[in-house]
Amino acid sequence: MNKEAIQHLFPKKALITVAGTVGVGKTTFATTVADMLGYHTSMEKVDGNPYLDKFYDDFKRWAFHLQIYFLAERFKEHKKIIDAPYGVVQDRSIYEDTGIFARMHYEKGNMTKVDFDTYTELFDAMVLTPYFQPPDVLVYLEGSFQQVLERVKTRGREMEKQTPIEYWKEMHERYQHWIDTFNYCPVVRVNIDQYDLHHHPESIEPILEEIAAAITVKR
């Protein structure tokens, strides 16, 4: 199926959000989908984050600051996407911040109850209102813990390589639980073994058809 035929399955404007744990391949997947559909991309911003390096050095000291920063940045980006006249494929959702990261740091003692309650109330005020438009579909990328860990190592970000394996394992498990209860918008679950964008780019076509069907059902 050529690009024109695939694009015909999709509306001119839609928000496709790609979610999944660190290292699962969200950025590559999102970039490929956007290219196939003629959509723009919205990538998670890592460079310029004033808290990220500090956070990896001291979780307890910087967890709350990091989560507030991410929440504000994602909310601003989400509003920009909704107001745009074109379709967008987004790398990482705002829902993951509260459902996984903030809750994990609270439960592990890296955020106090007061901080977590403040964060949650802010999230609710931003997102759980009639004025906030959820994505048209959330594509969840999943794979085994070993696959994800290998990808983290291959990516080579120094601050991630120095992070204990137990942290990545817990995050992987929390993601699996999170997606099982996620209900803010339609979900398409994709195992990373289902496609090979480097050697078999055509393997993404059945996934795109499934994504298009989910958007059509919603609309």
Image (cartoon, rainbow, N blue to C red):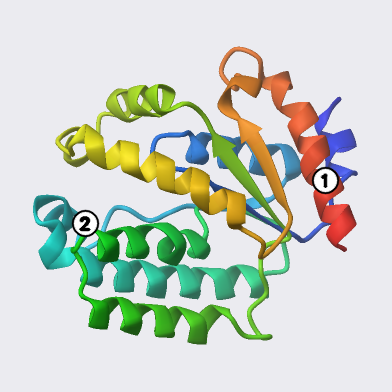
Q: Amino acid at mark 1?
A: Ala
Residue 178 visible in the current orientation: yes
Secondary structure of residue under mark 1: helix
Q: Residue at x 61, y 29 (%)?
A: 191
Q: According to the image, label 2 marks what residue?
A: 52
Residue 195 makes an appearance in the image = no
- Could you tell me residue 10's position as x and y percent? 84, 49
In the drawing, does residue 124 fall left or right of residue 45? right
The picture quadrant where one finds residue 64 is: bottom left
**Mark-to-mark CA distance, 1 and 2:** 35 Å
Q: Which percent across, then down, holds residue 201?
A: 67, 20
Compared to residue 68, the image places residue 204 above or below, namely above
- Amino acid found under the numbered disc labelled 2: Leu
User: On screen, 126 above or below 171?
Assistant: below
Mark 2 packing: few (<14 Cα in 10 Å), some, or many (20+)? many
| Residue at which label 1 appears | 212
Q: Secondary structure at mark 2?
A: helix
* Left/right of residue 146 with respect to residue 135 in the rendered view: left
